[in-house]
Amino acid sequence: MPTLQSTLQNLAQAFADQVVEAIRAASLQELTAVSNGAPRRARPVSTRVRTSSPKLGGGRLARRSSDDIEQTLGLVVAALGSGPMRAEEITRALGLDKKELPRVIKLGLTSKAIKKKGQKRATLYSAA
């Protein structure tokens, strides 16, 4: 007397064999019709024009040279001449992308062109 588990296993195996046999016997046209007839398409090619601005499409920044970073640091130091600012205020005042600033600030701190006070979002940067 077969157990319930062995009976279910035999039925599942028979079903799987029949599905595989039906797929093998079907033509390519039948198989594409089953998939709603919508052929898979490759990802569309971007038509964006790359500009000379630091920001490219997709949220990624263009590669910046060390001269570009030093020039931006000079702008940041000049902006900080009016008083201490948070990073968000610096980006807003200079019209920079928020992803441009961390490397500039790191260079400014290591070269001691700027100094900081505070932690995390409460950090205030000032000209040294």
Image (spheres, rainbow, N blue to C red):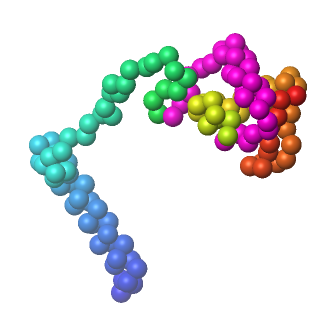
Q: From the image, which quarter does the N terminus lie in?
A: bottom left
Is residue 108 shown left or right of residue 32?
Answer: right
- Taking depth in this image into account, of 5 and 82 the one nearest to the observer is 82
- Taking depth in this image into account, of 52 and 90 the one nearest to the observer is 90
Q: Is residue 52 visible?
A: yes
Measuring from the top left, give residue 117's x and y in whole percent: 86, 43
- Taking depth in this image into account, of 58 and 119 the one nearest to the observer is 119
Q: Is residue 78 magenta?
A: yes
Residue closest to the far front:
82
For the record, the magenta segment spans 59-88
**At x 39% / y 84%, what residue is drawn?**
3
**At x 79% / y 36%, what residue is drawn?**
83
* Vertical order, 89 against 49 (above or below): below
Image label count: 0
Is residue 87 shown left or right of residue 113?
Answer: left
- Taking depth in this image into account, of 113 and 56 the one nearest to the observer is 113
Measuring from the top left, give residue 53's x and y in whole percent: 51, 21
* Vertical order, 38 against 113 (above or below): below
